[in-house]
Amino acid sequence: MQIGTELVILSSLATIALSGTIGVYLLRLWRSQARRLMTDLPLVFAITTIAQAVQIFIGQAPNYGLIQPSLELFRLRAMIICFSIAPILGAILQIWAPRFQKYHNRAVILVSAIWVATILLGPNEEFIMVMVIPWILVFGVLLLATFAITWKTGRLKEVRSDLMIVSIIFSMASQSLRVPLLGSTFFYIPDILLMLSMFFIAIAFGNPWYKRELNGKGSTPPPREIEMAVEY
């Protein structure tokens, strides 16, 4: 159990560092664009990764001896996760349902309201996780489909869509196993999988292969490309 706890702490520290670094990098990338949209992938993932770094730090605070674990602390983490998921939902709706744009904000508000109500009214951590994790998995499947399309069509050259697919699979596996492995000998596996997920996201958005290709051609990336054609 002691080794498992150490693995959780170490993997969580790595995830916090990766998430924070990726978030700051993507936020700067988004700000450097000539045209900035709220549904641009750099901004969406910047919010998500920074929020993830915050919620993981809060979750691990008891292991660092900074605070005592409690249901209220867990609720706070779940609220932050909700904040990080909302931009992803907005981007997914913009990509997959652009014709119904006038309903996008309502959908985001409705899902967020259900999420918050579940967090506030849930009697324990297990119940809250069982209720909200399916939402995360649904969004993960839609993101998986999105990057599968961009990988097949080559529409998002700045981001390694294949590595994003691997990252999403690891993230979904982390969420799927969190409840079944809770309290078991292998309780640390979800945290390791989440760390690997962030590692692949870092490589996917850093994309040194694309930068070498551009350097070889002596060109710069078109400003619209990284925004991801959210109109399709």
Image (tube, helix red, strand yellow):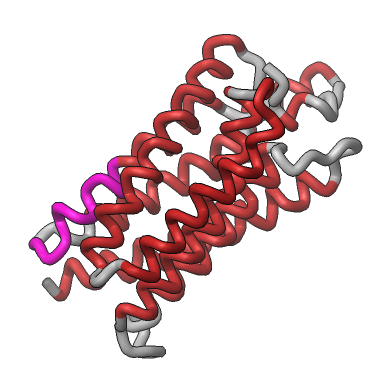
**Which range is magenta?**
173-184
Which residue appears at 16% of the width and 61% of the height? 182
Query: Does the stretch in magenta take in 54?
Result: no
Q: Position of residue 195 (x, y in %)?
A: 39, 53
Farthest left residue in view: 185
Question: In the rendered image, which quarter is residue 36 located in?
Answer: top right
Query: Does the stretch in magenta take in 176?
Result: yes
Question: In the rendered image, which quarter is residue 61 located in?
Answer: bottom left
Q: Is residue 68 left or right of residue 5?
A: right
Q: Is residue 136 left or right of residue 71?
A: right
Which quadrant is the N terminus positioned in? bottom left
Which quadrant is the C terminus positioned in? top right
Which residue appears at 49% of the width and 31% of the height? 143
Farthest right residue in view: 34
In the rendered image, is residue 113 in sight?
A: yes
Q: Vertically, is 51 above or below 45?
A: below
Of the pair 196 and 118, the residue shown nearer to us: 118
Q: Is residue 125 left or right of residue 91?
A: left
Which residue appears at 55% of the width and 58% of the height? 83
Of the pair 207 and 79, the residue shown nearer to us: 79
Q: Position of residue 124 (x, y in %)?
A: 24, 71
In the rendered image, is residue 211 in sight?
A: no
Of the pair 184 and 90, the residue shown nearer to us: 90
* Label tally: 0
Q: Position of residue 59 (x, y in %)?
A: 38, 72
Of the pair 73 and 10, the residue shown nearer to us: 73
Q: Position of residue 35 (x, y in %)?
A: 88, 36
Which residue appears at 21% of the width and 63% of the height? 126
